[in-house]
Image (cartoon, grey):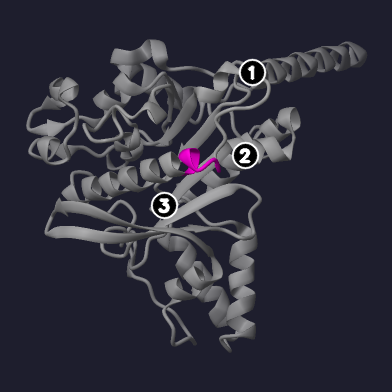
Amino acid sequence: MQDANKISNAENNAEKEKSLTDALEKIKGINIFILQMEYELSQKFLNEIYNKLIKFKKCSGEDAMYNVGEFSKLLMAGGLGSFKPDMVNGFYDVMSRGWGRIEARRHLHVFGVLYTKYIKGEGSITSRGIKKELVNIVRESLDRVRTYKEEINLKGIRDVSVEIYMNPFSELKEYWLYCPEIFHEAYCGTSDDDFRAVQSLLYRKVVLKFIKEQIEEGFMKRSDDNHNANNNVLLFSTSEVNTTLAIPSVVDDVYKHDHIFKNVIVHHYNHTIVPAGIPHYHANMFSRLNISEEFNDAIRDEIVDLAEITGRVSDVITGCSVMHTNVLKEDIFKKFKEKVAYDDMYGNSEGAYVERWQRN
């Protein structure tokens, strides 16, 4: 019986490996953009900030640990932001097995937000044993790659400056957006707070501008010697409905009809089904955000239903578990149930970090 089980397990593993290989071949050459508005910096970076606080800022070990903990909470509204880097690393590890690390890194791009002032649910960030603001110590430790001026004209804010940073201690292409006027707190207010819409709009403007420039300047490759048809395809993997505005077709602006974004595939992954994690906008924000008229029917009962827009623009929708995905299929995205997918390989529709999250 044990021998039979071993043979069965070996056959299952071989089948799973072939499925992964086939899937990687299908998406070979695609540029993947993972959109996150709650995304933690790597443990390695946080460890180095801890060392810097002790060795250059004269912090005690206890104060340095406290400060790093306070900073890390800025980037999360709960616990989700801490495990999303694991999920992205799962994508990267699987791609690396099929393509090698150079090509995996070249085709995988992540965009997070560097929040500055308030920890969700706890108020202002505090620090111990240092005079310089903690976020500024973090900023000087990251690599700044670009600065933009963006026009907002919403909620009393006209123009803002946005800086884009990279983590020097990650082999992934991970970017963080910094703008204190807009990105002061993760998921500010309640789920109907209009300022969340302002945050999402700025996120869209910066991410799409950066992608367009990187492609036009040749830093994000769109062609190879193999003439792969996927070279002209962009895959947007959106986290929660907060990032839906960043899909090019959703807002009627210069990016909606730009040839750079002509071939876009949208994967939406949902991590929470509670109302607090599924925000909506007040109806008057529809025109102020310049959301495309084709989504007019997403306005109901004086709100803009972001789940409705998300379902329409997504090509595939996944959840965190089979039970979670059932809820998405039967309730939240029931109008788009044919787009809700399960992971047949692992019984977990996240399909992310197999070694850590899906081990038997």
Q: Nearer the viewer, mark 1 or mark 3?
A: 1
Q: Specify few, some or many for label 3: CA neighbours under 10 Å numbering under 14, 14-19, or 20 or more.
A: some
Q: Is residue 310 above or below residue 110?
A: above
Asked if residue 70 lies in the magenta stretch, the reply is: no
Label ID, residue 6: none
Q: Amino acid at mark 3?
A: Gly
Q: Which residues are magenta?
A: 214-219
* Local secondary structure at mark 2: helix
Where residue 8 sits, quadrant-wise, is top right
Q: Write the residue at 72% across / 30% down.
A: 99
Q: Is residue 355 above or below residue 310?
A: below
| Residues under numbered marks 1 and 3 in contact, where contact means CB atoms less than 8 Å apart | no
The mark total stands at: 3
Q: CA distance from mark 2 to mark 1?
A: 18 Å
Q: Write the residue at 44% across / 41% down.
A: 211
Identify the residue position indicated by label 2 in the image. 106
* Local secondary structure at mark 1: helix
Relative image position of residue 213 (x, y in whole percent): 43, 43
Q: Quadrant of the N terminus?
A: top right
* Local secondary structure at mark 3: loop
Q: Specify few, some or many for label 2: CA neighbours under 10 Å numbering under 14, 14-19, or 20 or more.
A: some
Relative image position of residue 141 (x, y in whole percent): 55, 70
Relative image position of residue 133 (x, y in whole percent): 41, 79
Identify the residue position indicated by label 1 in the image. 23
Q: Amino acid at mark 2?
A: Arg
Pointer 2 or 1: first along the chain: 1
Q: CA distance from mark 1 to mark 3?
A: 32 Å
